[in-house]
């Protein structure tokens, strides 16, 4: 390699490595803090490695830390989040895909207006619709229940899912549908047989995105849940705000990591497919 | 005598309303008692309620000084599914009562008029009926002093701001942080309030509680801001976002000399094993002698399907008003019992002084609600905006006073 | 999928000329499929927003109260200095946030596009912050920025005892902390989108440029980047949307402070509607935020469309 090329290579790796360190720093700090004991926290700096692998804080955050008058840790909240996230992700992705297909491949007069109209829902600040939404759920007798939360999360996910799928399918040649129609296939059959099988990349993007957003949501989770249906973000918020005397940063950070673990795992496992899906067309706008 | 009468009444009420209670009832309690001794105090109540056969359904919503809990409450009410019991204080009680959302507590409030200081009874009532039950009474205008540090600089407990700054200067000269402060709008306003009161209880009443524009934009208020500005010179440089309990820890651990906070901070001192008079001193703030600013924390009970009070609601209310809970809850919370019949012999010296002052100021007219209790959230928010902006900028006192008058007027 | 185009006999029956029924179905089925979403959107988005807009013309304080108040709530809002601070703060948050995320994202994407080793690992490192909730991210950064046990303390422990890093306590610099956390969270995603865009640029064009003897920077400036306009606009749209909606990050990091130096309009709306019992003013601010959203997004979507047309 020529010397100037070599210098360029080193510079590239140096810049990338430098930013990688900065990006990892918060995670590192949170992780080592969660593995320390309280006396250790008092003496060392936040960058110091823990003296040993001590998972006591994790255990406490999971099953015995207080979140108000109840002291069962994050455990009960975790399952609620699972029950809320899974149906909402599946339903919103499915609705998004068929909407996107209809909008991209079956253009009709007004389809662009409908698309823009649906898309607007993605941009509204959700604080603005809390009260009417609560009233509506009350009318449906679903206030403060898991089904109510599933409805809310699904409904406000439709806009983004529709956009993703529409932008993906819009890149497919219209001839596909034309040819299939000549062959006598209808709307659903074409979707089922032609478009769904090639949609795996964009489904991955949509599912990862929706999973992350719904899992991490706090606003809807705190407002529309009841005592038996609070999601994990609400549990985390209660846990870090509940203290008796000394603030246990190790338990707080462990709880934060437990909350973040499912989404982190999804990103680590699915990250490659996420990028691939984006590459496959979603970014074309 | 009175004590026994009350106890009798409370038990009769419990028996009366409890007579028909064959079935256990789920009582959902929405609260934000999650820090320090609060959660222990709430656990006492939970155990008491479960002892008489009901189920406590805990809806703790932490964060934002109750802001999150209140957002949840509003959406719950509007969706027609309010929790049965809700932690509440201040004008919000009257607001909700005026919307016909609360159940009156007539069935259990029989003798409360004789047992509560009138200034406190007033904040629980709407239209002549009790709608709130008081858990305990907090005194806000306390300050805490690290005694070894005070001794080190050879100071005495200051009773005026001039004396205070003299002691603070000595601490600063000795290399200490004089004032442990939490840089939140909440703590900023708690500090500010004490200065306003030092200008006299009438001025405080007029300016803060009544929001009188003339008093708010007066030379006296300019003086208040001057003292506030001078105080900031004694803060350390890491105040932003520091919760008050960490500020308390600074005084506990000897990193700072003074803490200006209500009596709930005492729980932090007790939890750390510190003894009043030995490790720390609790004293009334400079210029605050003869004034007792209170916060009367309590619960209200929301109508279920627009109907009457449920048995569980009334029984919870009477449990809260029982001498037993008044005693134990207040102790955990660092407060004093609201009922004048509950003995405070088992309390520490700080609380004993507070209990004595409660009676004397109730008679003298020095018993006033703290701004956290006596103003609407809108006015309180406006005060906090101006005060916190003043502390975090180099605004001059005169324009801050003008801003305060304008902001409070707009929020009224 | 061996049988992508169905080959079963039943389907082939109506071949060649679609029946009238199927033409009718083709016309209406897409609408029928979309109609639930349209109805949902009309209720949950437009209906609820309309309800909030109605509140902005009432006397509502603690709870909705439908007593008309004309434009009084808007007068209250516009004469409230905290609102204008929030709007100005939004500018001082959005512009650095968007510029830095775009610039840094593009830089990382270009560098990662140089056939480097460990690309997958690096991408995962840059991308993981997006997996965290803003509450968790904001709390972690608050710890880092806290002078007592964060960066300042750590550097001092290394021996630089006079090191000062206390932006979180400085009302002029606190917003910078929020910007840093937000950039940290979004840059990896931006880089991934740009990288996807870069990979989409035709290899042949680049090779042709190299044959002509153009240097890499020139190739990027002349050929690659211009082809990226559509991606650029998509990213800009996403970041703008993110900037306007930023809320949890402020709650977790600064709660608006010091003073009101990190209040944003979304925080103002929540605070006034729910915490302060000034629902009418909160609703008026919600309406103004929507006006902002429309005013910013519509021209942007238009530009994006044009960029796409030019690119294709």
Image (tube, rainbow, N blue to C red):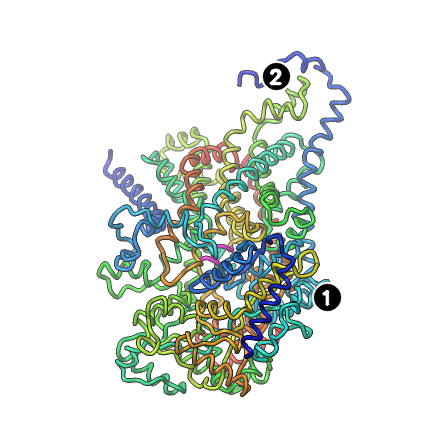
Local packing at callout 1 (Cα closer than 10 Å; few below 14, some 14-19, many 20+) is: few
Q: Which mark is residue C6?
A: 2
Q: Quadrant of the N terminus of chain A?
A: top left
Local packing at callout 2 (Cα closer than 10 Å; few below 14, some 14-19, many 20+) is: some
Q: Residue furthest left?
A: C159
Of residues C141 and C77, which is closer to you in this image? Answer: C141
The reply, left or right, for residue B43 in relation to residue A59 is: right
Q: Which residues are magenta?
A: C247-252
The reply, left or right, for residue C23 in relation to residue C189 is: right
Q: Chain of mark 1?
A: C
Could you tell me residue C25's position as x and y percent?
73, 26
Q: Which residue is mark 1?
A: C70
Quarter location, residue B173: bottom left
Helix, strand or loop for the magenta stretch, by majority: helix
Q: Is residue C74 visible?
A: no
The reply, left or right, for residue B296 in relation to residue A264 is: right
The structure residue drawn at horizontal position 58% and vertical position 59%, both measured from the top left corner, is B71
Could you tell me residue A235's position as x and y percent?
48, 51
How many numbered badges does the structure rendering display? 2
Q: Rounded to the nearest whole Å, what is the CA distance between mark 1 and mark 2?
A: 62 Å
Q: Is residue B300 magenta?
A: no
Q: Chain of mark 2?
A: C
Q: Is residue B270 visible?
A: yes
Pick whichever of labels 1 and 2 is earlier in the sequence: 2
The structure residue drawn at horizontal position 50% and vertical position 36%, both measured from the top left corner, is A205
Q: Is residue B72 above or below residue A8?
A: below
The structure residue drawn at horizontal position 66% and vertical position 17%, both measured from the top left corner, is A183
Secondary structure at numbered mark 2: loop
């Amino acid at each position: 390699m020529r010397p100037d090329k070599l210098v360029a290579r080193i510079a590239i790796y140096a810049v990338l490595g430098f930013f990688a360190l900065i990006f990892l720093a918060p995670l590192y700090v949170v992780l080592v803090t969660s593995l320390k004991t309280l006396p250790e926290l008092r003496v060392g700096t936040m960058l110091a490695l823990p003296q040993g692998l001590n998972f006591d804080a994790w255990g406490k955050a999971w099953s015995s830390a207080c979140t108000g008058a109840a002291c069962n840790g994050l455990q009960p909240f975790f399952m609620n989040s699972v029950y809320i996230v899974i149906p909402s992700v599946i339903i919103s992705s499915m609705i998004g895909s068929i909407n996107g297909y209809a909008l991209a491949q079956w253009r009709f007069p007004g389809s662009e207006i409908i698309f823009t109209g649906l898309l607007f829902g993605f941009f509204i600040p959700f604080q603005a619709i809390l009260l009417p939404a609560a009233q509506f759920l009350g009318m449906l007798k679903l206030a403060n229940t898991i089904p109510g939360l599933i409805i809310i999360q699904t409904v406000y996910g439709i806009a983004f899912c529709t956009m993703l799928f529409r932008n993906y399918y819009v890149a497919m040649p219209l001839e596909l549908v034309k040819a299939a129609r000549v062959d006598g296939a209808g709307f659903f059959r074409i979707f089922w047989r032609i478009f769904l099988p090639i949609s795996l990349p964009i489904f991955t993007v949509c599912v990862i995105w929706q999973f992350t957003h719904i899992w991490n949501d706090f606003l809807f989770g705190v407002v529309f849940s009841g005592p038996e249906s609070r999601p994990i973000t609400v549990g985390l918020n209660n846990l870090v705000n509940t203290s008796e005397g000394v603030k246990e940063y190790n338990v707080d950070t462990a709880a934060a990591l437990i909350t973040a673990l499912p989404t982190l795992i999804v990103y680590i496992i699915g990250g490659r497919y996420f990028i691939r899906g984006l590459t496959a067309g979603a970014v074309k706008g | 005598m009175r004590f026994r009468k009350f106890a009798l009444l409370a038990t009769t009420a419990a028996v009366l309303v409890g007579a028909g209670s064959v079935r256990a009832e789920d009582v959902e309690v929405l609260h934000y008692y999650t820090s320090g001794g609060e959660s222990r105090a709430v656990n006492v109540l939970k155990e008491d309620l479960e002892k008489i056969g009901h189920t406590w359904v805990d809806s703790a919503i932490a964060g934002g000084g109750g802001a999150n809990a209140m957002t949840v409450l509003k959406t719950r009410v509007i969706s027609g599914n309010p929790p049965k019991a809700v932690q509440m204080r201040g004008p919000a009680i009257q607001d909700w009562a005026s919307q016909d959302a609360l159940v009156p507590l007539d069935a259990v409030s029989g003798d409360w008029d004789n047992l509560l200081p009138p200034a406190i009874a007033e904040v629980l009532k709407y239209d002549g009926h009790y709608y709130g039950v008081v858990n305990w009474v907090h005194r806000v205008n306390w300050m805490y002093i690290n005694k070894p540090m005070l001794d080190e600089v050879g100071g005495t407990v200051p009773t005026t701001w001039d004396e205070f700054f003299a002691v603070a200067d000595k601490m600063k000269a000795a290399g200490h942080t004089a004032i442990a402060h939490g840089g939140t709008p909440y703590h900023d306003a708690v500090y500010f309030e004490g200065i306003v009161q030092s200008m006299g209880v009438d001025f405080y009443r007029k300016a803060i509680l009544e929001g009188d524009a003339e008093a708010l934009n007066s030379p006296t208020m300019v003086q208040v801001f001057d003292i506030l500005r001078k105080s900031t010179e004694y803060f350390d440089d890491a105040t932003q976002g520091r919760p008050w309990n960490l500020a308390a820890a600074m005084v506990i651990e000897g990193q700072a000399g003074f803490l200006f906070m209500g009596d709930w901070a005492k729980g932090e001192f007790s939890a750390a094993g510190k003894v009043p008079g030995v490790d720390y001193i609790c004293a009334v703030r400079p210029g605050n002698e003869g004034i007792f600013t209170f916060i009367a924390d309590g619960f209200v009970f929301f109508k279920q399907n627009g109907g009457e009070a449920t048995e569980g609601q009334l029984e919870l209310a009477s449990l809260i008003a029982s001498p037993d809970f008044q005693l134990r809850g207040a102790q955990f919370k660092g407060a004093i019992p609201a009922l004048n019949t509950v003995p405070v012999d088992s309390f520490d010296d700080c609380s004993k002084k507070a209990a004595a002052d409660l009676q004397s100021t109730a008679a003298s007219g020095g018993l006033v609600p703290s701004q956290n209790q006596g103003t609407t959230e809108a006015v309180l928010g406006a005060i906090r905006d101006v005060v916190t902006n003043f502390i975090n900028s180099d605004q001059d006192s005169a324009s801050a006073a003008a801003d305060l008058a304008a902001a409070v007027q707009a929020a009224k | 999928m061996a049988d992508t185009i169905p080959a079963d006999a039943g389907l082939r029956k109506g071949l060649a000329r679609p029946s009238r029924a199927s033409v009718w179905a083709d016309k209406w089925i897409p609408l029928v499929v979309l109609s639930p979403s349209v109805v949902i959107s009309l209720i949950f988005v437009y209906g609820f927003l309309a309800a909030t807009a109605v509140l902005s013309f009432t006397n509502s304080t603690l709870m909705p109260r439908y007593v008309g108040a004309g434009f009084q709530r808007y007068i209250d809002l516009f004469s409230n200095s905290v609102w204008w601070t929030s709007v100005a703060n939004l500018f001082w948050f959005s512009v650095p946030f968007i510029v830095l995320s775009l610039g840094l994202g593009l830089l990382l994407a270009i560098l990662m596009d140089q056939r480097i080793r460990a690309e997958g690992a690096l991408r995962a490192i840059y991308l993981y912050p997006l997996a965290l909730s803003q509450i968790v991210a904001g709390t972690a950064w608050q710890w880092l920025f806290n002078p007592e046990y964060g960066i300042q303390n750590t550097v001092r422990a290394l021996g630089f005892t006079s090191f000062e890093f206390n932006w979180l306590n400085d009302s002029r610099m606190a917003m910078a902390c929020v910007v840093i956390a937000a950039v940290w969270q979004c840059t990896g995603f931006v880089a991934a989108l740009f990288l996807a865009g870069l990979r989409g640029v035709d290899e042949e064009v680049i090779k042709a440029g190299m044959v002509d003897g153009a240097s890499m920077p020139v190739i990027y400036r002349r050929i690659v980047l211009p082809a990226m306009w559509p991606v650029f606009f998509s990213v800009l749209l996403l970041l703008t949307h993110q900037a306007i909606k930023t809320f949890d990050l402020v709650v977790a990091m600064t709660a608006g402070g010091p003073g009101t130096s990190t209040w944003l309009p979304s925080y103002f709306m929540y605070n006034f509607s729910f915490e302060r019992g000034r629902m009418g003013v909160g609703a008026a601010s919600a309406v103004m935020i929507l006006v902002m959203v429309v005013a910013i997004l519509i021209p942007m979507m238009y530009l994006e469309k044009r960029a796409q047309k030019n690119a294709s």
